[in-house]
Image (cartoon, helix red, strand yellow):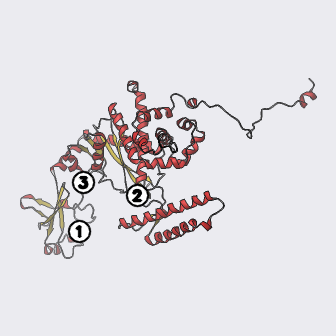
Amino acid sequence: MSAQNAASKQPLIRFVNRQQMSWRAVDVDKLVAQDHAARAIWALVGQLDLSRFYEEIASSAEEGGRPAFDPQMLISVWVYAYSQGIGSAREVARRCEYDPAFQWLTGLQEVNYHTLADFRVGKQAELDELFTQVLAALSKEGWIGLEQVMQDGTKIRALASGRSFQCEDTLREHLERARQCVAELADPHCEQARPARTRARQRAQRERQQRLEAALEELGRIQRAAKVSTSDAQARFMKQPDGGLAPSYNVQVSADAAHGVIVDLEVSQQANDSAELLPAVERIEQRLGRTPQQMVADGGYTTREAIQQMAERRIDFLGSLGRDLAGTGVTAPGRLPISAFEYVAERNRYRCPEGKWLYSDGRRREGAGAVYFHYRAKPEDCRSCPRKAHCCPGNRRSGRSVMRLEESPTVKAFREKMATAEAQQQYRRRAQVIEFCYAWIKCKLGLRQFHVRGRKKVRAEALWACLTYNLQQWIRLRKLTPAAAAG
């Protein structure tokens, strides 16, 4: 062949034609491999009793109506979505159109994002029972023992910005504007060429009006707050791990130490954890019908009241109770510390370095675990004292006072126990167990900020995340013990 003929030869190319329509046969069952996580989630959800989800379906074969989506499918879709770090209902609906795993779970059905969003927050009682069922199954297979339960809380950001917090006057002004917008959009003379767009705007304005009304109601209920969020009225400013403040919720989690299974959760509006320990124990008892043998929590939960309550319930409690610094002078720099005063027990008095007496001046009880005894010197003894400038320079009309703390036998026994090497070793396990749960939820499941508003809905999303976590641990444990999976 000549060079001229070779140059004139046109190659045949199979070009991409994206304008053509095509029909394709899809074997749905082969969209995912046999060991795919979606299959495992579907199988585990199918083992649970979902009758309460089916009871709520209004349509029936006898009365007719539009067929509802299978609750097993919706549950499996949400669990798989969270396992992939997807928390947006719109994104889940989009994935159902092209992602093989979601297509396998839905059987190629198109699921509207409204259906997904409503199902996530609308079945809270049923979801709570489902979470308890998973715990019962894990307990039956021996993966929950309650010999040691770790308790902790973490702050997860709310679906609101700091700038959304407004005072009462601004809230009422925004509410009046929202009501005017709703009234204008409801006027039939204002109908636009696209009714669907008008209805969407009406829905958005109604939701805004409802959030503003909820914000005013919340502001009236919590008298101490000067501002609430117009986006999520029940969110509160809380300190974040990076040291900043942001609208958040305090998610409380209890995890069994044996295999790290989450046995309870709750969502609190309070940044402080001190009142959350006993309610967590009561919820665990209600879910599993057993009392934890040992509870382990950090210093945020370790109060004298908590120590007394755990002792009354015969629960071994490990925590971090700091030393009480009241009256020691540590919190008042420049003052003579209480260690410089001599306590004379037989006379129930203190003697100062100059030999003057401090007499009993009453006592104050702090819960059931401690009593503070007050002692005060005579004013005339302190006025002429050469040490006054270093002992009580601010006392112009009264003498120096000190306090003596007397703790209950239960609290003293707790301090002695926590001073042992064994208790400290067990206490250090808390971080590796509970922090793993939070790391999984925030990093693998992607729940660093909630996708819904309001404490009730936020709790539902937290429950979905913890349910997903437990199902993933169930799958992992079954792989480690094939005998249990076969059974």
Label 1: few (<14), some (14–19) or many (≥20) C-alpha neighbours in 10 Å: few
Specify the quadrant that holds the N terminus.
top right
Secondary structure at badge 2 equals strand
**Foreground residue, 315 or 358?**
315
Q: Which mark is residue 114?
A: none
Secondary structure at badge 3 equals loop
Q: What residue is drawn where x is 38% and y is 25%?
A: 487
Q: Which residue is mark 3?
A: 323
Image mark count: 3
Q: Which residue is mark 1?
A: 390
Q: What is the distance, in whole Å, between disc 2 and disc 3 at their CAs?
A: 26 Å
Of the two numbered discs 3 and 1 in the rendering, the one whose residue sits closer to the viewer: 3
Report x, y in % for residue 142.
32, 31
Image quarter of residue 221: bottom left
Q: Earlier in the sequence, mark 2 or mark 3?
A: 2
Q: Earlier in the sequence, mark 3 or mark 1?
A: 3
Q: Are marks 3 and 1 in contact (CB under 8 Å)?
A: no
Q: Which residue is mark 2?
A: 238
Report x, y in % for residue 23.
68, 34
Q: What is the distance, in whole Å, between disc 3 and disc 1 at their CAs?
A: 24 Å
Secondary structure at badge 1 equals helix
- Residue placed furthest toward the left: 346
Amino acid type at image mark 1: His
Report x, y in % for residue 326.
23, 60
Q: Earlier in the sequence, mark 2 or mark 1?
A: 2
Q: What is the distance, in whole Å, between disc 2 and disc 1 at their CAs?
A: 39 Å
Q: Is residue 339 above or below residue 426?
A: below
Report x, y in % for residue 57.
45, 44
Q: Is residue 197 visible?
A: yes
Amino acid type at image mark 3: Arg
